Image: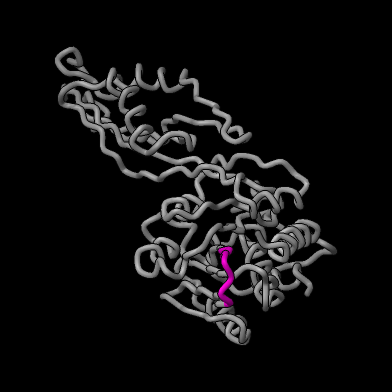
């Protein structure tokens, strides 16, 4: 199977978030023709499973949506390079999943292929989250591999995220008599200084180097050009390593903020996503690591490995494509990357665990 050409075929089926239906129909028809698979569709999510009674089950997952195209909607193959939106993130991974589904009719482990919608938008829309809530039985397994672009190297675990909105109060006054008021925007000064000087933890977990972050990401305030503002809001994002729970990360963030708050101020938690520990001690993952020939590295962002971890399934990120190209106009996929990712997973499945 020409994996690069198959990826190009998938790229040419537009599947921006919330518009994945045509691609899901394509996948359903292709997988439905494979008699060794049981296919179940839940909304715009598609799950294909073997039922061979093996003692272990491997779950391979990937999202079907892409970000909006940016002059790169059509696939273009130039030699051994495929250009186009979603080529790396993550239709190359979907092509690998299709090839593995077709090839492994009687593998030593049972296999589940999960094609889920709406990963590139807010977490509340996630198709994988929909499956967790409504059909967790379809996700059951012993280990999971998410085909996110990693350059065919293992990216282990993922960092969690806590986002808050800080509301600081002041008192309005005319700017000609500014001393009669209290400028809420000026109150941000000390907090922004502390955030700028913040030294993030960099723990090493199972040999993977994580790097936390604490950043101001948005600010809003002001009334008029002649009014001392009486309120300002600041959005703060905290990325935390998987040796901390969401409660511990939230507490750490609140401790930092508390020195800058008055009684009338408040902090609103706007988003929380759990981290996931690396799963490098799992034998199936060890087989992938050995075949890849590359050391595992920490996933510094958040991915759906955390959703699997929350339901008790250890998971890793492993797929073709350069993650730094995702969401860019220059997004592309090279043949060597997709063929390496396929060969590594194919060998791991054939060996079982």
Q: Quadrant of the C terminus?
A: bottom right
Q: Is residue 196 above or below residue 278?
A: above
Q: Is residue 75 above or below residue 223?
A: below
Residue 53: within the magenta?
A: yes
Q: Residue at 14% x, 15% y: name it.
A: 180
Relative side of 223 to 236, left or right:
left
Q: Position of residue 345 (x, y in %)?
A: 70, 61
| Membership of 63 in magenta stretch | no
Residue at image coords 83%, 62%: 80
The percent coordinates of residue 26 (x first, y second) are 58, 80
Give the quadrant of the N terminus.
bottom right
Q: Which residues are magenta?
A: 52-60
125 and 205: which one is in front?
205
Give residue 333's position: percent from left, percent from top.
73, 58
Closer to us: 274 or 176: 274
Instruction: Answer left or right for 212 relative to 338.
Output: left
Q: Quadrant of residue 179?
A: top left
Q: Colour scheme used in the picture?
A: one colour
Q: Quadrant of residue 9?
A: bottom right
């Amino acid at each position: 199977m020409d994996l690069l050409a198959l990826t190009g075929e998938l790229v040419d089926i537009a599947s921006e978030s919330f518009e994945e239906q045509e691609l899901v129909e394509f996948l359903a028809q292709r997988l439905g023709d494979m008699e060794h698979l049981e296919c179940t569709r839940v909304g715009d999510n598609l799950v294909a499973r073997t039922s061979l009674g093996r003692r272990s089950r491997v779950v391979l997952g990937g999202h079907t949506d892409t970000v909006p195209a940016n002059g790169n909607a059509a696939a273009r193959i130039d030699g051994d390079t495929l250009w186009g939106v979603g080529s790396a993130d993550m239709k190359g991974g979907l092509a690998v999943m299709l090839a593995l589904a077709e090839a492994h009719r009687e593998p030593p482990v049972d296999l589940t292929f999960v094609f889920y919608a709406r990963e590139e938008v807010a977490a509340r829309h996630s198709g994988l989250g929909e499956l967790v809530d409504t059909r967790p039985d379809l996700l059951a397994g012993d280990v999971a591999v998410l085909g996110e672009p990693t350059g065919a190297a293992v990216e282990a675990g993922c960092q969690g995220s806590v986002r808050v909105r800080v509301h600081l109060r002041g008192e309005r006054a005319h700017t000609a008599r500014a001393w009669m008021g209290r400028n809420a925007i000026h109150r941000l000064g000390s907090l922004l200084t502390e955030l700028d000087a913040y030294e993030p933890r960099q723990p090493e977990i199972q040999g993977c180097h994580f790097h936390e972050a604490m950043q101001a990401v948005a600010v809003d305030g002001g009334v008029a050009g002649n009014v001392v503002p009486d309120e300002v809001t600041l959005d703060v994002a905290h990325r935390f390593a998987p040796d901390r729970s969401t409660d511990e990360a939230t507490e750490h963030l609140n401790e930092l903020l508390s020195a800058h708050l008055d009684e009338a101020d408040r902090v609103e938690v706007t988003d929380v996503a759990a981290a996931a520990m690396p799963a490098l001690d799992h034998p199936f993952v060890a087989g992938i690591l050995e075949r890849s020939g590359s050391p595992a590295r920490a996933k510094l962002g958040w991915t759906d490995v955390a959703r699997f971890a929350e339901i008790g399934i250890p998971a890793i990120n492993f797929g073709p494509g350069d993650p730094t190209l995702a969401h860019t106009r220059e997004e592309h996929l090279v043949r060597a990357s997709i063929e390496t990712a396929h060969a590594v997973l194919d060998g791991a499945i054939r060996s079982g665990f």
